[in-house]
Every structure is written in C-alpha cells, then in structure tokens.
Amino acid sequence: MESAPIRLQIDPLRTTGRRIDPNLYGQFAEHLGRCVYPGLWVGDSSPIANDHGLRLDVISALKTLELPVVRWPGGCFADNYHWLDGVGDRSQRPRRHNLWWKQPENNAFGTDEFMTFCRLIDTEPYLVVNVGSGSVQEAINWMEYCNSNQDTEFTALRKKHGFNEPYNVRYWGIGNESWGCGGKMRPEVYADLYRRFAAYLRPMGGRDVRLIACGSYPDFPDWDERFLAAMQGALDHVDLLALHIYSGWMGEEVNFSNQEYYQLFAAIDIMDRHLRRASELVTAFSTADHRIGLALDEWGVWHRQAVVENGLQQQNTLRDALFAAASFHLFHRYAGTLEMANMAQTVNVLQALIHTRGDRIVLTPTFHVFDLLKPHRNGQLLDFDFSPLPMIDFPDQRQRPALSLSATITKDGSIFISLINIDLERSFAVECRMINALHKIRSIRLLSAEDPREHNSFDLPHAITPREVEPSGDEVIQVPPHSLMTLSLQA
C-alpha cells in the first residue's frame, strides 16, 4: 500500500527577509594541474578554437551558467605569485616554478588574460593579492593597474598592453590560507599584516572595493575570533571573512559504497556548524556603521584520488552533484551573512564544472546543478511547511532528513523550488499546496540516474543531463531516489 504524499505548503507571503545573493554561485580558478593550462588557456596558435588564446568551447559553456564571480589566481598559488610576471609580451614573460603544485608556470595567462576571460563569460573578477611572499607596494601597484584611470605609471602600462579602460575590480582578497600555505602564521600576526595591506588598499580602491580577509577552516576554528579580536580599531577594513571547507576523502571517487555515499552528505553538518559559528562571530564584531559578511571562497568535494601528482583531477559523479545542490540549500539558509561562495574549481580540478581532453570537453553533473539552480539567484527565500519528513538512518547512528528543499520567490511573484532526494532506494510523492495564492506548476526538470555512481565521460558525455518532466496537473510529483528536481510555479 502506497503511503500518503508528503505535504509541501508554501505561502508566498512568508518570506524570510533574506535575498539569495547571486555570488553564492561563484567559482574559483587556480594555477593548479590542468585548470588554467589547457582548461582555460590554449594559446592563440593552438588548433583548438580560441579567442586570443582562451578556448571557446569552455567560454561558451561557462557563459550559459551566468557565473557571478570567479576567484583567481589562487589558492596557494596566490601567495607565491607576482602579478608583473604575467603582463606584457608573453614571449618575454619569465618562467617560474609553481611552488605548491610542483609544475612549471610560463605566465602566459596573467591579469589581462584573466580579465578578458571574465569579460567573455560576463562575470566579476575576484583577485587575491600576495601577502605570504609579496609586498604592500606590489599589491597597491596591482590595484592601480586594474582600477585607476589617472595618468600614472601603472595605468600607462595597462594601456600600453592594449587595455585602455580600467577593469574596476571590486573584490580583493588579502592573502590565502595564511594559517597554512600562505605563511603558517598565527592569526594575530596575520592581523597585523592585514592591517598594513588594507590601510593602503582601502584608500586606493575606496568604499566600492570589498576587502576580504583570510578566515578559518574546520581544523582551526579559533582563528576567526583571534583574528577579529586582533583587528579591533580597524574592523572597518574587513568587509568579508573567507572560510575554506572541503568535504570528502571517504571511499573511491566512483566505486564508493552505499555507506560512503551517505557519509559524504553527513559532511554538510560540518559546514553547517562552521558557518553558524563564523556567522555569529562576524555579527558580534559588526557595528551599525560597518557590517562584516562571510565568504566561503573555497568549498566542494575533494576525493582522496585527487593528488598533486595528477593535478588534483577527480571524477565527478551524480553523488557529487547532489552534494553540491544540498550545499547550496545550506548556503541559502545563511543568506544575508554569507555573501559569496566559490566552488573549487572551474575546469579539470577537484569538483570541476568541465573536463577537457584535447579539443573535447565534458560537462559534469555538477555543471548541471549550477545551471538548474540559477532561478534561485536574487530570489527572496521562503519559509515552508514540509511534513511528514522522511528520515534516513546514517552510518554515524544519526537520523537525517531524506529530502532537502529550498524555495524562493521573484519580484514578479514566480516561485522556484529545488528538491533533493538523498535516499538511495525510496521514491517520494510530494503534494505542493499553495496558501494565499493560486500558483500552478509550469515546468519540472530532473537530474537523476539509475546509479549515483554514474558520471559523464568522453565516451558517454551525456549520461547525466537534466530532462524535462511533464507536470501531471494534480500538483503531486514523484521524486526518484538520489535525484534533484526543480519546479517553476507561476500565478
């Protein structure tokens, strides 16, 4: 006997007052493995179709996602990167050793190439300045090169390179993982350095520039409080505090067990605790005149198969995609305090959106999650009633909900719902009921597969792609096991 449908009740008048910042759907591209070379850059003499060296197939695919922001050049690479190495005549640029990722760096892809890439995919650039091995003057010069329109040495240099108009870069990270590869500092030492850099970058960039400080990761949770306490008297120079949280390291990237499947979703609890703690801290250190927000500018799945020797490349399964979708639902709950999130990384590295091989590309299941959830951006987060909520017994002896849901409403009154069924075996019937409104389901899209281990490969590039589901008309939908379903409702 079939069980009664789960009741989902939504009242468009019950908004949470929180807007979903598009920047929660940001990306991160580092000079690591095959992300930049040849993921983004092949050079203008390559037989692969390109626009001034930037591969057009990747550009075209990323443009469809309408990515709001991309972080560059790192990551650990940022604190050993000197931006002047990457501008001017490419044949004259110095070759360097990529210290952390153990590969050569020819500097063919530098500031102007990155800005061109951002223009082609219509995204905001987010630059990370070198604090670990760089200087304040180097950082000021880089901001002047990017943002100034005055008659100065570095503005003239940008114009000499063929870029007359300033780039007006808004987001500037001051160092990366300063507790680790960025200098192995104590938070109090980093706070003193941050004060120095910010004291010069703020007047150079003005209030339109957002300065982003290095925050913690789960194994160093007291970093944030110690850093913010040491910044007393200069907290107005901290616009965002950036956290890093990676999940994974259990089982195989593809041939994982059912237990390992659920263990990955349990890691969302770790993100939740870390975000809650940091959110309370930045709220406590904010003032009426200056609010400090959060960025999660490195996050995603990192499987143990992704190592330096293979350029941190890993396969991307339906499980990884569903984890990304469930993570976005979590980020929505922190909207307002959490202003930005940047998944690692864009191409060929970790939980990539795209894999490349020669002149071919494959869109990963995670790519499709970014595409499916686009309608949430800029929407107002809605409260809802969802019962009875089915539960799953997880390997850690805890019960967690089988279904994850997020709902938003746009200015024109349209409602968008994303619904994830984490359960490996059970399908659920969900009845959508509207209160104080007469909305109907107009379209349904589904991302699913027979097995959560399925993935897109160069042999089977479309094994997992979203498909349209015809609405039944009775407002009851069937959500298959291990799937993501999105619903668009209109009055």
Image (cartoon, rainbow, N blue to C red):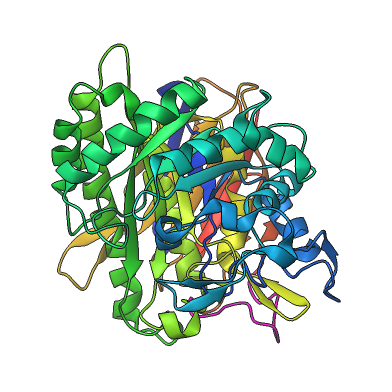
Q: Residue at x 20, y 53 (%)?
A: 185
Given residues 246 and 197, the one toward you in this image is: 197
**Place of residue 429 in the rendered image (x, y in percent of width and height, measured from the top left):** 48, 55
How many tags in the picture?
0
Residue 335 position (above or below residue 42)? above
Residue 291 position (above or below residue 91)? above
> Looking at the rendering, which quadrant does residue 242 occupy?
top left
Name the outermost residue toward the front: 153
Side (left or right) of 188 relative to 236: left
**Place of residue 291 in the rendered image (x, y in percent of width and height, measured from the top left):** 32, 22
> Looking at the rendering, which quadrant does residue 309 occupy?
bottom left
Residue 386 position (above or below residue 491)? below
Q: Is residue 73 magenta?
A: no
Q: Quadrant of the N terminus?
A: bottom left
> Looking at the rendering, which quadrant does residue 196 occupy?
top left
| Span of residues in magenta | 452-464
Q: Residue at x 46, y 68 (%)?
A: 320
Q: Residue at x 27, y 57 (%)?
A: 183
Side (left or right) of 401 relative to 83: left
Given residues 264 and 130, the one toward you in this image is: 130
Is most of the magenta stretch helix, strand or loop?
Answer: loop
Q: Is residue 457 magenta?
A: yes
**Place of residue 302 in the rendered image (x, y in percent of width and height, measured from the top left):** 39, 71
Q: Is residue 1 visible?
A: no
**Place of residue 186 in the rendered image (x, y in percent of width and height, measured from the top left):** 16, 50
Q: Is residue 98 visible?
A: yes
Q: Residue at x 62, y 28 (%)?
A: 148
Side (left or right) of 1 relative to 491: left
Q: Quadrant of the C terminus?
A: top right
